Amino acid sequence: MDVLLICLAPEMDLKYQRLYGFLHDDATRRHASIALVQKLLCLDFDEELRARAAFAEAAPLVRYRLIALVKDTADPAAPLPAQQIRIDAGIAGHLLNGTGLDPLIVAHASLKTPAEMAADAPAPGEPCTRIADLLDAYLAQEAQTQLVFYFAGPDAEAKRQTAETVCRKLKTSLIRADVKELVGEGAEIEPLVARVLREGLLQPAAVFLENCDWLWENESRAVYQLRALQELTREMGWVVFVTGKRPWPAAGLREDQVLLEFDFPVPAYAARRDIWRAALDGGDRPADDPDLDELAATFRLTRAQIQDAVLVARNRCLRRAGRSPVMTGEDLRVAARACSNQKLGAFGRKIRPRCGWPDIILPPDILAQLQEFCAHARFRGRVYDEWGFDRKHSLGKGLTILFSGDSGTGKTMAAEIIAADLGLDLYKIDLSTVVSKYIGETEKNLSRIFAEAETSNAILFFDEADALYGKRSEVKDSHDRYANIEINYLLQKLDEHEGIVILATNLSKNIDEAFVRRLQYAVAFPAPEKQQRLRIWEGVFPVETPLADDLDFPFLAKQFVITGGSIKNIAVRAAFLAVQNSGAVHMEHIVRAAKREFQKMGRLCLESEFKQYYDLVK
């Protein structure tokens, strides 16, 4: 205390700087030194020797950064008594002002008193009462065992509300700090996190450390960072809430510490529906609102994401409708997509759906299967959560469908239509970002994709899926062994993933049987029949395209046995031929475009197919 007062004096009155310079017999040394403190506070040489221990690295003054020792830059090798002493800025501010946070952490930390904390109660089932009871028992002990609470899971808002509810019951303040922002890439955890925990003792206040699982993302530094965090919470922790998305590593716990882990998963379907209703105009939506049922089932969002989505939807309404907006289900779906994780773009291309159910021409049974798939996706929250199937199935709660068929039969269009119908983003995964020739890299890439997909609320679309999901082979060498490991890993990720996955392949026989068993749906896209080809021809040109009277769609549908993708290519090429000639699409343009498509496919242009138009292509 005497050392702190001596160092604090110049903060209160600058005349002490002149006085210290006079006592040092050096006007440039305007702060107290260890030698000066010894002379002021010690009666003899023996006391001066004992006083040196107060400035050791492990001594409280230095360990808790109450003071900083400053070496003389002109003489770095000067003895310990020559070092100057500066009081820490955060400690000086606390002693003089008594309010506010340490200036070194204030940019990434916040302090809330019990009166400032929101009075909104956490969702039912959150462990507020249990935590408060544990803290009451812990704080009542004379020989206290260090108690740390770890909140794991993605629901950051529920974690915050739980901590604030506990603090209100304890009538104590709460300091929140984001460890990832506070520490930064490659920096040491100790200096700044120690200041946050020290601030919790000074205020006093409970400490809420967010994103702590970021500390052990780097495997080479994970053990060191974890131990450093445990040591800091043991030394300076009072009531500490540590949070992260992933579970706490089960290694390195101290005997004098008790770490209690609580899970905060994404709210279940019924809870998500209640949160949507409460966030929308104070809960005045009807209990059977179909939009809320669909939003809760389709988008696995946390409480904070749902609240953000409602604000985004309101802003969208105001931009469109002015002062009296009417929020639609489409506004809410767009906002929910915007508030989901958007990082899947690093692994594939986001496809913006431009087609609807009327645009795809398929046999009735195939259409029925696709619509059943959409219904499965729309109502699976109710079946799993409300009807109890979640208790029966620990894995395989995702939704996977296989599209098989020749190129151009409508597989990609069907994926777009499903995404549009469900109001979800569709990401076509780029296989070049997944498959690697290096052992183990493919699995790492897949792990990152599925990890991002868990919070993206998007559909994963793997085209040419047989490249990834091919059949396992007999192990004859190390290459076969590692190829089989990749496939086994894919099987595992499909079992664990709870989102929607669409696989498309031209070679369904090459798909491993183990994948087929894990599919909820398998749809074979056939080549279109004559009547279906006629409907495709009649709908392939946009309404704005000028069409000549000589177009003979029945002839084209009968004579050209091709897929819808080829018909689309012919229509586009014919439009470009027409725009530079007559300005309208004639039969001549379509026939010539068909010739180029046949050449591309390696097919001969036969007179039996082109009949009276054969002279245009021979």
Image: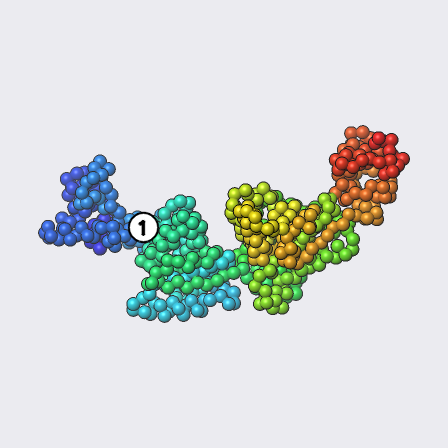
The secondary element bearing badge 1 is classed as helix
Residue at horizontal 23 percent and vertical 52 percent from the top: 4
- The image shows residue 1 at horizontal and vertical percentages of 22, 55
In the picture of the structure, the residue carrying the numbered disc 1 is 90
Q: What residue is rendered at 61% in x and 65% in y? A: 384
Give 183 or 553, whichever is nearer the viewer: 553
Residue 180, given in percent of the width and then of the height, sits at: 43, 49
312 vs 152, nearest the viewer: 152
Q: Position of residue 107 (x, y in %)?
A: 40, 48
Q: Which residue appears farthest toward the right when viewing the image?
A: 612
Badge 1: residue crowd in 10 Å (few <14, some 14–19, many ≥20)? some
Q: Is residue 13 visible?
A: no
Quadrant (top left/top right/bottom left/bottom right) for the C terminus: top right
Q: Looking at the image, which residue sits at the far top?
A: 581
From the viewer's perspective, tell me whether residue 241 is left or right of residue 33. Answer: right
Residue 237's spot in the image, x, y percent?
34, 59
Residue 177 in view (yes/no)? yes
Left or right: 161 in relation to 41: right
Residue extending furthest left? 44
User: Which residue corresponds to the image point at 40% horizontal and 70% vertical from the top-left?
Assistant: 133
Q: Residue at x 79, y 45 (%)?
A: 536
**Taking 416 as reference, is 163 above or below it?**
below
Q: Amino acid at mark 1?
A: Gly
Q: Is residue 160 above or below residue 614?
A: below
